[in-house]
Amino acid sequence: MRRTPLVGLPSDRKQIGHHPFQAVGEKYIRAVVDGAGCLPVLIPSLAPPLDLRALLQSLDGLLLTGAYSNIEPHHYGSDPSYAGNLHDPARDATTLGIVPLAIEMRVPVLAICRGLQEVNVALGGSLHQKVHDIPGFDDHRENTDDPLGVQYAPSHPVELAEGGVLARIAGARQAMVNSLHGQGLKKLGRNLMVEATAPDGLVEAVRYESARDEDPGPFLVAVQWHPEWRVTENPFYLGLFQAFAAACRERAHQRA
């Protein structure tokens, strides 16, 4: 009998009043349930982190979510963090360690926004701390005064790589996506292939591809936009979660 796959979601460590809390946005949890048909399992981001290898042995997939915080720039050798930049060292310790382990252990990964940046940094890549301050790039941030439905509405097209995972899901070479980020990919991490680019040339999605021709590696797709938003209402977003779910079901079957 096939069982429902378990998908881990690393949490954010947030200070609420006098106490730290572990939190994951409900929209990501709902997307795992409604878009992927999997069971979400929250992974506490602790310092020091949990035994990540033991944890992954019990999971069928990993969803790296977006967050208000950004990766501390010392992890990718950048300039000091700018004033007011929010950080979450406990989440960094968890996610930057879990990405290479997930690849090694062949756990499917879907990464969103901060998650894309975590995948890139974990594999040796770097980031622009402020994309909007880099000549030639657009401002990819949302207007926080707008209602959420406007903030998460389609904002710009992305060009999808020919023969890539996302082009197969979309059935086209272009798709419209939302845009709610201030940071972006600079240097690509190891074995990451470009899946989508914005009109200004910024990399908006990647996939992992092993250097070995006989084994391309596990499912790992990371996107800069937010496909979790009203996932069942957008065929492209839903298709991405369903592709992730198929990889998770295969792992659950193998583990059973």
Image: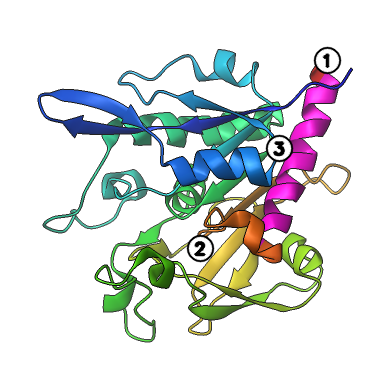
Local crowd at mark 1 within 10 Å, few (<14), some, or many (≥20)?
A: few
Residue 140 falls in which quadrant of the image? Answer: bottom left
Which residue is at 37% across, 64% downward?
148
Q: Which residues are magenta?
A: 237-254
Residue 104 visible in the current orientation: yes
Q: CA distance from mark 1 to mark 3?
A: 18 Å
Which residue is at 43% across, 16% downward?
50
Q: Is residue 41 left or right of residue 2?
A: left
Q: Is residue 162 left or right of residue 19?
A: right
Residue 24 falls in which quadrant of the image? Answer: top left
Residue closest to the eye, 192 or 47: 47
The residue indicated by pointer 3 is: 37
Q: Main secondary structure of the magenta part?
A: helix
Local crowd at mark 2 within 10 Å, few (<14), some, or many (≥20)?
A: many
* Disc 3, SS: loop
Vertical placement of residue 143 versus 95, above or below = below
Residue closest to the eye, 97 or 250: 250
Q: Amino acid at mark 1?
A: Ala
Q: Amino acid at mark 2?
A: Trp
Which residue is at 73% across, 57% downward?
239
Q: Amino acid at mark 3?
A: Gly
Q: Is residue 238 magenta?
A: yes
The residue indicated by pointer 1 is: 256
